[in-house]
Amino acid sequence: MLTYLLSILVIMGIYMLLALALDLQYGFTGLINFGLAGFFGVGAYASALLTLKAGWTPLLSFPAAMLAAALLAWPLGRVALRLRDDYLAIVTLGFSEIVRLVLVQEQWLTNGVQGIPGVPRLGAGWGNARFSDMLLLVLLALSIAVAVAVLRRVTHSPYGRTIQAVRDDETAVYVLGKEPARFKTQVLMLGAALSGLAGAYFAHYMTYIVPDQFVPLITFYVWMAIIMGGVARLSGSVAGAVLLVLFLEGVRFTRGIIPGVSDADMGSVQLGVVGLVLILFMRWRPQGLFGGRGAR
Amino acid sequence: MNRRHLVAAFLAATAASSLSLSALAQTSDFVVGALSPLTGSGAPYGPGMVKGIQLAAKEINAAGGAQGAQFRVVVEDTQTAPQAAVSGAKKMIEVDKVRAILGCWSSGESLAVIPLTNEADIPLMHGSGAPALSADANPKRLGFRFQATNGRFGQAFAKVAERQGYKQPATMAFNNASGIGNTEGFTQAWKAAGGKVVASVVYEPNRPSYRSELQSVLRAKPDVIVTGSYLADTTILLREWYQTGIDTHWIIPGWAANADLIKALGPKVTEGIISVESVSNENAPNYAHVRDALGKEGVDVAGNVYAPMAYDQAIILALAVQALGPKATGSELAKKVHEIGTPGGEAVYSFADGKKLLEAGKRITYIGASSALNFDQYNDVTPDFAASFVENGKLVRKYVVKL
Amino acid sequence: MSYADYINLVINGLVEGLIIALPALALTLVYGLARFPNAATGDIVAVGGYAGLAAHHLTGSLIVAGLAGAAGGAVASVLAYLLAFRPVIRRSVITLLLTSIGVGFVIRAALGVAFGHDPRAFDMPLERAWRFGDISIAPADLSLAALTLLTLALVFFMLYATPLGRSLRAIADDPDLARVSGIRRERCMLAMWTIAGVVCGIAGTVTGMRTVVYPDAGWNMLLPAFAAAVVGGLGNPLGAVMGALLLGVLQELSTPFVGFVYKIALGYVVMMVVLLLRPQGLFNRPVGVR
């Protein structure tokens, strides 16, 4: 059971990084990012290709993955950040689909729909698969701790107050002589870097990546996580990721419990429950289970 | 704070309960994992595959086990997703200590799991089509593929096209590994025989219309269009083709050109379509036996070709264990499985018969219910294919293609 | 590639645009009145497709199928409004948007459980296309065009020539003034959701007839419908249809240059370009988008 728990914890950790990224963008800065899966995928492919094809060590490919994702966020920021909420949502969604199509089409680089098998495990030369998984989990936990610490400093600093002001009242920010778009771009890039890091961990844990794993549904899973856990609250993002993974894995144990629903339909039921959670939380507890100021 | 404690307590309780369960495992059993899609898009096939493995285990144990070791099957659901397959496989390998993993279905599942089984030095037996599973992902030859590779499908298409006298084929492929694998297999085989492919198009899934794609192919005036497609997109393609009024022929994989397609489009549109599918080993005595035994369990073997494959996986593995003993390593077992799955020995069709001959020191060749196996150097099976023609709204099998 | 090939591409683009035009219209109607992009639009289209399929299966009549599709879409749309959207209608756009994502998931799950994931097709006779040299036009596509234009005409007639339409436009322009003038908001909202549902339902049946019906069909047309509505200008019915046609034609014309995979990306790129240069859309007057 320990190994199974280990794999669950790794997936939880990856979703935690994604939830932290999204919460920074939406909870603290009010950016509606429906394109998270795109940055996740770019980070995964960047690290996978650099280690597999160019022989880089993960020590370098992980930061490269973060950088690649962040750089990708920059043009998106320039285009989209002057737009209102709902337009931003549509544009970011379209953006992540464009990323996926590029991953599919540029086969010379990404191997297209065949995917990339054989991504090297972390610490492959030092031990067996179990050792790699433990090493990955330890590094992942460290990354999460660092991310939370950094984000806590950022959100409690004057910078953090500014971005929350951007979320609450952009005009006031202008009046104070600051340019909201600059902050939005920075937050978008920072969140993208975190998502790229999550992608790198994902690639080296799964050792096989394919464009179909980076679809909008992943983005909406993460949205569900931060909505359940509570926006604008870092501990909420972490808790939300735990709940999300418990839910996704819980399907494994609820097979056969609901009468009249065959096994094949459990996938549909899972989707329906995600939808219900979104609807119910938005209506009755928009601040999430763990609360948080500023949630709308 | 309360909720966080609740979550932690839940995790601890689950861990504790499952640790105690695994302590009950017996050490004299030979444990194998059945890792199949019980939910998700593979759900029509997964439960049947698991039942096939369990049926085989029953027969193996009834014959006294493999050198006395009883076969025990552990079942996990892949949810037809690489990620869930990986967590299921990890649990099986590390907790249940399985000696082999059987029953993987989709290429995503197998490609994600095979690094784990390679690392653990245990065989992986699957029914997936991805080319990488032959050599690139299979360096130790621990992976066994019980379904025809996409490349072989393509070769079968080429033989059919040649036999029908076509000279100017074009290809249309659904943009995924399987669809492209089929058409590339065809193209390679066709060009190797000196032919030319006049047009080839890869189309995106889930589109409402494929007219531009179709027109770009028809512009090259092919006499036959070979597809790597699925039911939904084939329906759209054929419908739009018929409306153009341009004459051509079609060679389509059997999972797309089936009774449902004929029902959707009607006899006029589908007249003359050639449907190519790999055939189960229908003349073998164990095919009828497996068909009936699984039929009693609610599995329709004609509609689920993967169920007899899974049955064969378990039987041939047990024969290898019988030959070498339950303490043999994964690599040793894999070599034995390869030997038993290739011609040269006395033909056997069941575990009991094979066990008798092995105890007498003879070399055996297991002929499977899903196919005659006949592993090649990559441990891929080389089944036969059937070409069926749609005539007056019915599929009629005309001939068998041997590669 | 001859000139005939290019004309065929344009025709294909118009046909694809017409398929997207109705969902884009429904999106823009809801946006005009309720002020949020309804991500469940695609799934309501799928409901219409299944309703039409069931009716056609029972009666064999295309007209009945169309009516059933419209009715199915209307019921789904109104139920979604009453159960999910109305309670949060005064909240922020993001709340409504996320709720609509949730509604879409629930509808898709229900369709998947009820009907399974196998694609289903309408049992319909097929006709050969008319050919003018190398240019081909299918009668089925002409019917599709006629039906879409008819639906459009009816919607426009409703919007511009009936009291209900005047009320809807008034609320869209200035909700407070409308209320003060005695226009009954709730009744108008119900009417609008019903109309949007009818439009979606017809779209679903028509698309189902041309292609196949499956639970995810709606989600797959959502993003193109969004792009079309945004390009035309959210809230502008004519803009939604023109945007759909424009994007359809541009995508198909681009295929000789970018291929069949990237043509899909082109739609999103055009959307972003329009938002950058003319954020109110091609057919709208400048209004607060930034």
Image (spheres, grey):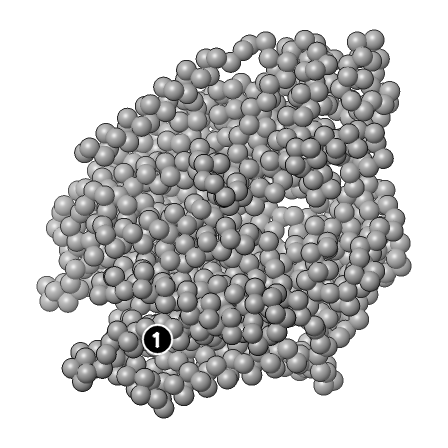
| Vertical placement of residue A52 versus C15, above or below | above
The local secondary structure at tag 1 comes to: helix
Please state, as top left, top right, bottom left or bottom right, where the C terminus of chain B lies in the image: top right
Q: Position of residue C163 (x, y in %)?
A: 31, 88
Between B100 and C61, which is closer to the camera in this rendering? C61
The residue most toward the left is A176
Q: Which residue is mark 1?
A: C192
Residue at 47% of width from left, 60% of height from top? Answer: C219
Amino acid type, residue under disc 1 in the picture: Met
Q: The residue marked by circle 1 belongs to what chain? A: C
Residue C119 image-quadrant placement = bottom right
Position of residue B93 in the picture relative to residue A162 (left or right): right
Between B394 and C56, which is closer to the camera in this rendering? C56
| Vertical placement of residue B367 versus C121, above or below | above
Residue B131 image-quadrant placement = top right
Residue at 46% of width from left, 23% of height from top? Answer: A130
